[in-house]
């Protein structure tokens, strides 16, 4: 019984983390008025990374990140990354690649803010999310409230386990 509760919580945590990434993609694509207004959508040709990279970065890597602002390849990688990470976490498939991609994206965002968050001298949501994704990967959370168990048994994943 306790194991079922833990599995349910892990599945729910995975769904929530996936929705964070997926929502960021949807909002930046369609400009639903939360973080992105309707006149600044990617569909209208506005860079989804330029505002943050021009004005939101600080610290020792600021110049590097500012140089990436409005670079189309960076925009595509960012948006496709949000979509892939979000879908993989929500569905519980491609968890290894989606999870590692999420960890890399979050680590890059953390270094972009200058390794010094606004509300705490060391820790912010990027670090917490990285640790959550690590827990999700270590516990095979894709199998709970997701398609991970089915996905792991496909011939494709049996042949290429990196895609689990």
Image (cartoon, rainbow, N blue to C red):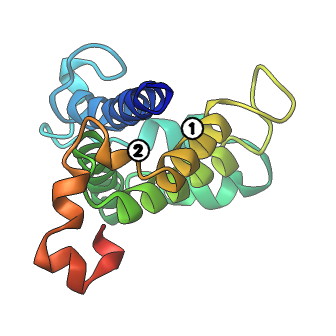
Say which quarter of the image contains residue 123.
top right
- Find residue 62 and report its horizontal and vertical position in percent: 69, 51
- Label 2 sits on a secondary structure element that is loop
In the displayed structure, does residue 69 sit left or right of residue 154?
Answer: right
Asked if labels 2 and 1 touch by Cβ distance under 8 angstroms, the answer is no
- Find residue 24 and report its horizontal and vertical position in percent: 33, 32
Say if 95 sits above or below 38 in the image. Answer: below
For label 2, the residue is 49
28 or 99, nearer to the observer: 99
123 or 109, nearer to the observer: 123
Say which quarter of the image contains residue 146.
top left
For label 1, the residue is 129
* Structural crowding at the residue carrying mark 2, measured as other residues with C-alpha within 10 Å and reported as few (<14), some (14–19) or many (≥20): many
State how far apart marks 1 and 2 are (Cα). Answer: 20 Å
Outermost front residue: 1
- Find residue 136 and report its horizontal and vertical position in percent: 48, 46
Mark 1, mark 2: which one is toward the viewer?
1
Q: Can residue 79 be seen in this view?
A: yes
- Find residue 86 and report its horizontal and vertical position in percent: 30, 43
Outermost bottom residue: 159
* Structural crowding at the residue carrying mark 1, measured as other residues with C-alpha within 10 Å and reported as few (<14), some (14–19) or many (≥20): some
Say if 13 sits above or below 115 in the image. Answer: above
In the displayed structure, does residue 87 sit left or right of residue 5?
Answer: left
């Amino acid at each position: 019984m306790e194991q079922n509760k833990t599995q349910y919580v892990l599945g729910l945590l995975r769904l929530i983390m996936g929705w964070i990434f997926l929502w960021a993609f949807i909002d930046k694509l369609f400009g639903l008025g939360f973080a992105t207004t309707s006149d600044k959508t990617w569909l209208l040709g506005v860079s989804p990374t330029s505002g943050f990279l021009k004005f939101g970065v600080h610290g020792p890597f600021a110049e590097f990140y500012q140089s990436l602002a409005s670079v189309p390849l960076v925009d595509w990688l960012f948006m496709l990354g949000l979509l892939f990470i979000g879908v993989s976490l929500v569905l519980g498939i491609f968890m290894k690649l989606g999870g590692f991609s999420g960890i890399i994206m979050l680590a890059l965002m953390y270094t972009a803010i200058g390794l010094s968050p606004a509300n705490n001298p060391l820790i912010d949501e990027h670090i917490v999310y990285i640790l959550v994704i690590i827990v999700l990967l270590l516990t095979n959370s894709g199998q709970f409230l997701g398609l991970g168990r089915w996905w792991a048994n496909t011939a494709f994943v049996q042949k290429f386990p990196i895609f689990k």
